[in-house]
Image (cartoon, rainbow, N blue to C red):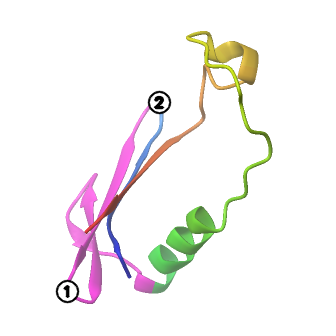
Amino acid sequence: DDVTDVSLAYADREIALKKVGEEWRLTKPLDSLADTTAVKNLVSAIADCEVKKELTETSADLSQYGLDKPLVTVTVSLG
């Protein structure tokens, strides 16, 4: 219930969702009412992600972690 915005940035497109009251709206690539159940499932899937490996050293070279070319970048905003 704390999530207010979700964006999914792919190489060729962006999908943005915003919670307005109790409803979710698709704001990119167009403005439309979103399927609330689908968005809640997406938010739950993101929240339920598990850490597979914890990095103890930081590096600017993300390729050594397989993170240099992400399929999608997910951004979640809490309100």
Question: Is there a contact, CB below 8 Å, between mark 1 and mark 2?
Answer: no
Q: In the image, residue 38 lies at what x, y percent?
A: 51, 78
Q: Is residue 54 left or right of residue 27?
A: right
**Up/down of 79 relative to 49, above or below:** below
Q: In the image, residue 35 lies at what x, y percent?
A: 41, 81
- Along the viewing direction, whichever of 65 and 30 lies nearer the viewer: 65
Q: Secondary structure at mark 2?
A: loop
**Up/down of 73 relative to 33, above or below:** above
Q: Which mark is residue 36?
A: none
Numbered-mark total: 2
Q: Residue at x 54, y 69 (%)?
A: 42
Q: Is residue 4 left or right of residue 57?
A: left
Chief SS of the magenta region: strand
Q: 10 Å neighbourhood of mark 1: few (<14), some, or many (≥20)? A: few
**C-alpha separation, residue under disc 1 versus residue under disc 2:** 31 Å
Q: Quadrant of residue 12?
A: top left
Q: In the image, residue 46 lies at what x, y percent?
A: 57, 62
Q: Is residue 12 left or right of residue 28?
A: right
Q: 10 Å neighbourhood of mark 2: few (<14), some, or many (≥20)? A: few
Q: Which residue is mark 2?
A: 11
- Along the viewing direction, whichever of 53 and 13 lies nearer the viewer: 53
Q: Which residue is mark 1?
A: 21
Name the N-terminal-most of marks 1 and 2: 2
Residue segment shown in magenta: 12-36
- Judge whether residue 19 is colored magenta: yes
Q: In the image, residue 3 lies at what x, y percent?
A: 36, 70
Looking at the image, the residue that sits furthest to the front is 56
Q: Amino acid at mark 2?
A: Ala
Q: Quadrant of residue 79?
A: bottom left
**Up/down of 42 relative to 72, above or below:** below
Q: Amino acid at mark 1?
A: Gly
- Judge whether residue 70 is colored magenta: no
